[in-house]
Image: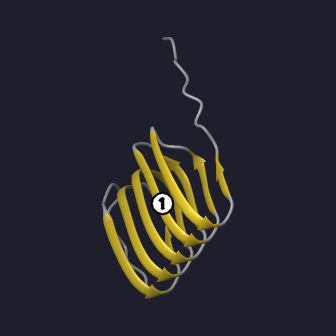
Amino acid sequence: MTITLPEGSSIDVITGSGDTVTRGALADVNVTTGSGDVKVGDTVNSVDVKTGSGDVIAGHVIGNFECRCASGDVRCDGAAKNTDIHTASGDVVVTAERWRRYLG
């Protein structure tokens, strides 16, 4: 299934089994899945993922990144101000975002 939303939209996804992929700048992304990989691309305000089995990859998260996995690897390429990750089995990789102050 493919869904097209305006930039800045929020989305809630619930699946029993299946991958979830987002592209584009979204506000809040909430995904609950029994089994499936979750990939959140681009810049988003917040990400909340709950998965029984599956890998989770997030791009740049501005606000909150929460992830609960029973089994799966978790990667956040631009960590949020508030990051909370729980996994029973899997690797976790978090890259801190370097905040820069620009002088004009």
Query: What residue is shown at x 60% (from left), y 38% (from top)?
Result: 96
Query: What residue is shown at x 48% (from left), y 74% (from top)?
Result: 51
Nearer to us in this view, 69 or 102: 69
Colour theme: secondary structure
Q: Residue furthest top?
A: 104
**Amino acid type assigned to the residue bearing label 1 in the image:** Cys
Relative horizontal placement of residue 31, taking residue 59 as reference (left or right) = left
User: In this rendering, does residue 23 appear at all?
Assistant: no
- Figure check: 27 above or below 34: above
Image location (x, y in percent) of residue 5 = 33, 68
Relative horizontal placement of residue 96, taking residue 5 as reference (left or right) = right
Q: Which residue in the protein does label 1 denote?
A: 67
Residue at disc 1, secondary structure:
strand
- Figure check: 39 above or below 60: below
User: In this rendering, does residue 78 appear at all?
Assistant: yes
Query: What residue is shown at x 48% (from left), y 43% (from top)?
Result: 80
Which image quarter holds the N terminus? Answer: bottom left
Q: Quadrant of residue 11?
A: bottom left
Image location (x, y in percent) of residue 22 = 48, 67
- Figure check: 53 above or below 44: below
Query: What residue is shown at x 64% (from left), y 43% (from top)?
Result: 95
For disc 1, the neighbor class at 10 Å (few under 14, some 14 to 19, many from 20) is many
Q: Residue furthest front?
A: 88
Image location (x, y in percent) of residue 2 = 43, 82
Image location (x, y in percent) of residue 52 = 50, 78
